[in-house]
Amino acid sequence: MAIELICLDADDTLWHNMRHFDATQAIFADLLAPFADAGVSREQLTAIEIRNLKLYGYGAKSFTLSMIETALELAGDKLTDRTIADILAAGRQLLAHPIELFPGIEEALDRLGSHARLVLVTKGDLLHQETKLAASGLGDRFSGVEIVSDKNADTYRRLFARHGVAPEQAVMVGDSLRSDVLPALSAGAFAAYVPHDIVWEHERADEPVGHERYRRLSHLAHLGDWIATL
């Protein structure tokens, strides 16, 4: 059965994202230096961010709230209004970062569009993700855009049904094993993993070695060649 739907992650698959979060974490660590070692503040921030996912979801706004909460836990009554203001400024800067496409992405999407319909599947804050897509200039290449609160097997099953394809007619590609690959495979689809140099701890998972519907790729440009063999 031929592939009719190609689902693509956005952040760190089409454009840079984690490098901006890393830069913001470095700013945060500097701000908290009077109260905690950089390693401690980063570790605590990650733990609080993951703990808050059920309340705030994913994205830069959630990250900013978690930075403030981490600062309160580490600094206590010594936390100043100035430091909170600086944290908020770092969060605003994260929300406003420029969109930098990975090399060859536009050409890769154009080639993939000749194989099947393209659908963007990304999680996070609705407004921020819409803003990033608009700034990327890639919107016209997609027949659909799905901004979801999380990515799990049920998310993908609903998505495939909404776009009128069976799971085995769809492929999901992204940089996260936990969010893009494993749940898509569980839903019955094909999945391709395009690794990124920076991996958020929450997105780490074991690679499904030997799975017949899975492929690891060095660049999105190679996805079409794999799809042609399916």
Image (cartoon, grey):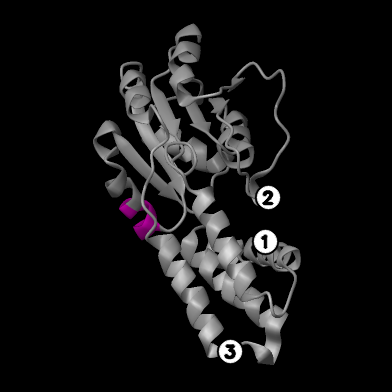
Can you give x and y, in whole percent of width and height, for residue 175 in the image?
55, 36
Can you give x and y, in whole percent of width and height, for residue 6 in the image?
41, 26
Can you give x and y, in whole percent of width and height, for residue 138 in the image?
29, 37
Q: Give the camera-side residue of 118 and 68.
A: 68
Q: Give the range drawn in magenta.
A: 126-131
Question: Upstream in the sequence, badge 2 or badge 1?
Answer: 1
Q: Is the residue 19 above or below the residue 89 in the image?
A: above
Task: Kindly check if marks 2 and 1 are in contact, taking CB atoms under 8 A apart as contact.
Answer: yes
Q: Which mark is residue 144?
A: none
Q: Name the residue under label 1.
A: 46
Structural crowding at the residue carrying mark 3, measured as other residues with C-alpha within 10 Å and reported as few (<14), some (14–19) or many (≥20): few
Amino acid bearing label 3: Thr
Q: Main secondary structure of the magenta part?
A: helix
Q: Mark 2 points at which residue?
A: 201
Amino acid bearing label 1: Thr
Q: Mark 3 points at which residue?
A: 80
